[in-house]
Image: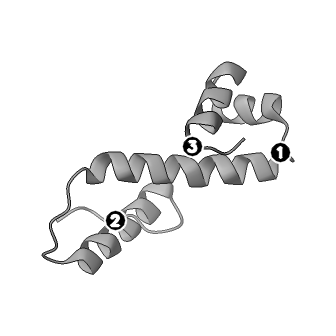
Amino acid sequence: MLNKRSGSSLSTHAYEITHRFLSDIGDTECTGIYQRVIDETEIGMLQAIMEFTQGNQSKAAQLLGITRATLRQRLTRHKLR
């Protein structure tokens, strides 16, 4: 079993949410979970960052450690702009 970290780390939240998702789907056939987790996590993160920066893409890109062009691509990919 994975070593659960205490506190409020992102990995702890990811573990708990993924574990809950797997429990919810049970024996239901499901594929592509990795990409689904990545996409849905990215959507939530982008929404939170854009809200935090009040829509300032330069500040958001800086916080994320990516270029503005990459941020715009991600926002467009997820239909967030």
Residue appearing at x 20%, y 54% in the figure: 31
Whether residues under marks 2 and 1 lie with C-beta atoms below 8 angstroms apart, the answer is: no
- Secondary structure of residue under mark 2: helix
Say the numbered circle drawn on residue 53: 1
Alpha carbon distance from label 2 to label 3: 21 Å
Type of residue at label 3?
Answer: His
Give residue 36's position: percent from left, percent from top. Answer: 36, 52
Alpha carbon distance from label 1 to label 3: 18 Å
Q: Report crowding for label 1: few under 14, some 14 to 19, many 20 or more residues within 10 A (C-alpha).
A: some
Say the numbered circle drawn on residue 18: 2
Q: Quadrant of residue 70?
A: top right
**69 on left or right of 37:** right
Q: In which quarter of the image is residue 20?
A: bottom left
In this view of the protein, which residue sits in the foreground, 78 or 34? 78
- Secondary structure of residue under mark 1: loop
Residue appearing at x 64%, y 46% in the figure: 46
In this view of the protein, which residue sits in the foreground, 67 or 75? 75
Whether residue 11 is situated above or below residue 61 in the rendered picture = below
**Mark 1 vs mark 3: in front:** 3
Q: Name the residue under label 3.
A: 78
Alpha carbon distance from label 2 to label 1: 28 Å
The first of marks 2 and 1 along the sequence is 2
Give residue 62's position: percent from left, percent from top. Answer: 73, 29
Give residue 79's position: percent from left, percent from top. Answer: 62, 44
**Mark 2 vs mark 3: in front:** 3
